Image (spheres, coloured by chain):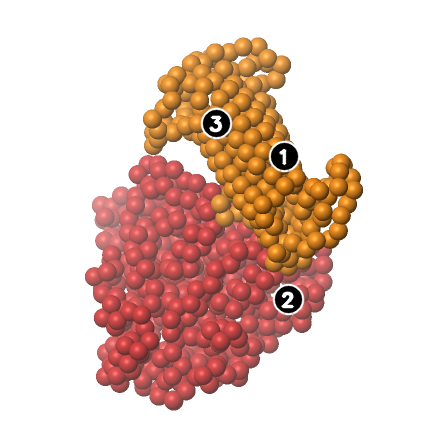
Amino acid sequence: MKLILKNGIVYDPANGINGEKMDICIKDGKIVEKVRFAKEIDVSGKLVMPAGFDIHSHIAGGKVNVGRLFRPEDSLRRLVARKNGLRSGSGYSVPSVHLIGYDYARMGYTTVITPAMPPLLARHTHHELNEIPMIDKAAFPLYDGNWFVMKYISEEKFDELKAYVAWLLWATKGYSVKVVNPGGTEAWGWRKNVHDLDDEVPYFGVTPREIITSLVDACNDLNLPHSVHLHCNCLGEPGNYEITIKTLQLVRHKDFDGRQSLYVTHLQFHSYGGDSWKTFESKADEVAKEVNKNDNVIIDTGNIVFGDTTTMTADAPMEYDLHLLTGLKWVNKDVELETAPGVTPYIYSPKVLVNAVQWAVGIELALLIKPEKVILTTDSPNGGIFTNYPKVIAWLMSKKAREDMLAIVHRSTEHRTVLPTIDKEYDFYEIAMITRTNPAKAAGMPNKGHLGVGADADIAVYDINPLEFNPKDYEKLEKALSNAYLTIKGGEILVREGEIVKVTHGRTFWVDAMSKVDRSLIEKDLDYYFKRYYSVSLSNYVIGENELRRSERVCVS
Amino acid sequence: MRELILKLKEKPDLCLEVEGILPNVIVEKDVGEIENLPIQYGNRKVKLSEFFDISVEKSETPRVVFEGDMSRVKRIGWKLDGGEIIVRGNAGMYLGAFMSNGRIIVEGDVGHFSALNMSGGEMIIKGNAGDYLCASYRGDWRGMSGGTVIVKGNVGKELGSYMRGGKIVVEGIADDFAGVSMKGGLMVINKAKSRPGAGMTAGSIVVNDVDELLPGFFEEGEEENPEIEGEKFEGRFKVFSGDHAERKAKGKIYLRI
Ligand SMILES: [Zn+2]
């Protein structure tokens, strides 16, 4: 199919295009220089960007499904009937499988990565991903509480570690190395947690510092497209900004020829000062300073949005603490030899000071860190479901939007944060960076997140004229960004004026680095661990490529 | 004002769902429009007139009257926010669920999940009620918050689970776990079977007789003509606090002696 988008106002930071009126030509699913005899669509006066790229959103897998199962009241809150060939569904903070694809497409997003796949539940995760329509996707398997990882680190067997990292990506059809509360999830099995980079994990004796740095080096040695994707220790705890800064500093000198060496996720939950809930305050400025200084790190924000949501992380001790705090229902999962997720509902209230500070921290980080190092997420659904992105963008682009919210939130917020003193307002170029360019680049997907020749023709057009945009009209912006005028994926029009006109199924990206390692190094250990400890056999554990609806194997060179 | 009388033609094979047939919605409509209102029959939509004979009379308040055995008619008065619904017969599941205002009177028995998450208004049930009367919706920790429900007969299990406010009166027997996880409001029960108030942290349950109290309830003494949740009660009561299986539990059970 050939297509020309005429006269749109284009923002494509990867190619330095900042609000230029130009045509975009599409042929065979790719962006091309020129195209003849193509269908033309006039998008003059409309905002044109690469399609959205969400690098961290919990859309599939064990805990997402647990969230659905144990929150029928959340399902009741949003019921969607079958209509125009679209499937029915339900769920507000944990939408059912098909709705996730529809909702992303309506927002102009076409690539989403689910960031915490317990390896043992990879099959379930892929089966769910297979059914999510509209988007391209990938999954990050969890390496944090993994017995192989900790064994090889404690025995200082780096080649074996690398072989295992590559093998697990291959076995689970995963994309990159996710690390959640390193050491903490295994310690949780002993009813403990870790609170410092040098706390030892029971039995294995390794520390968070060793786990992080070993895996960072392994990812680099294997030349994986994405770096370690890290959820730091002490999530959500007052005063945790110190361990966050120490963690960021671990890679200050790990300069891998301009590649990022560490990706730190939902930084908002890790930038708190104070020593108790009473003295809880923002340390976003301190953390932002470290991120800005540190060339080897990139972050996503993990903004929170007020309202009712379902928290789900592979950080089981944190979810337990949260449940103790709220008294609300809670589910814990233990994934043998690998990790331990938890799920509990949470309500962010603007009148609760801690929540108001959290809201401010997320925005402060986005405003204080250089936009080329920022990626916008809500750690969906932990900080709020992803359909709230337009709202978060409005807060970044409009000081008025922030002031209107500051007028509603707990009035001590202004003493606990610096948000009221920040005048910066994002422009569309920077928004395109933090929702398109940066996540695609950080994930190492060269054909995504930009509109240069050869890129995937994944494009979003919004019915708002960026050249005439007044930040005070932020409600109009929110509306425009929530309902894409056009969502084009692989050259096909999926959404027109906010309505889905075509249902497709995207590809699942996974990384094959087996050519870089010697599998025989770990063969014996695999055999032993699976026979001795796992409840499944090794042959049943491995996901076949034929189990993915549309497999996109990324071979590492 | 008008009163709409809906006479069930015959008991349907599948369940009907009549959500949307509310006094405030139909009061201004003409009969032709009302006949065409959609209701759910199994997995398809049908016209109201397919299952009901419809007639209209004058009345002081907007009112819908259901005549016949409605035990296979679900969601009568779902999200009722005003006016009156009268059921001359039995009612099916989800009667008056999520109602916030108005009144429902049922001459017969009602199905499970009636008055679910009720936040206001009044319901009078002259027969028996099923399980989960006045309970919270499945999974929700925010249950009934207001309104009054009176049952002349017996009620099923988990009456008023997660109740936060309002009042429930049961003149017959309440099955096991009445007031489970209750966090507020008042429940007056003639006789409770096993374990009323399990996991309750606030609110009060007044009972004349009970089969079995949980060990999480501590005897606090006796009271004469106590005031409970702002209401005067006559007689002597043994007072229990609980359920101390929960943190900071301030629930009360008053057992008549
Ligand atoms: Zn996350």
Write down the quadrant of residue A555 in the picture: bottom left
Q: Which residue is mark 3?
A: B91
Q: Which residue is rendered at x = 69% and y = 50% of the image?
A: B240
Label 1, label 3: how far apart the Cα atoms are: 19 Å
Q: Which residue is rendered at x = 47% and y = 32% of the image?
A: B111
| Secondary element type, mark 1 | strand
Q: Chain of mark 3?
A: B
| Left or right of residue B215: residue A259 | left
Q: Colour of chain A?
A: red
| Left or right of residue B166: residue B156 | left
**Residue A424 seen:** no
Q: Residues within 10 Å of mark 2 (few under 14, many from 20)?
A: many
Judged by depth in the image, the label closer to the viewer, 1 or 2, is: 1
Q: Which chain is orange?
A: B
Q: Nearer the viewer, residue A208 or B210?
A: B210
Q: Chain of mark 2?
A: A
Type of residue at label 3? Ala
Q: Which residue is mark 1?
A: B169
Give how far across and how far down residue A405 sits, in percent: 63, 51
Type of residue at label 2? Ser
Q: Chain of mark 1?
A: B
The answer to whether dots 3 and 2 both sit on one chain is no
Q: Which residue is rendered at x = 48% and y = 25% of the image?
A: B90
| Secondary element type, mark 2 | strand
Type of residue at label 1? Val
Q: Residues within 10 Å of mark 3 (few under 14, many from 20)?
A: many
Q: Which residue is mark 2?
A: A282
**Residue A314 seen:** yes
Asked whether the residues under the numbered discs 1 and 2 touch, taking CB atoms below 8 Å apart as contact, a structural biologist would say no
Give how far across and how far down residue A380 sits, in percent: 47, 57
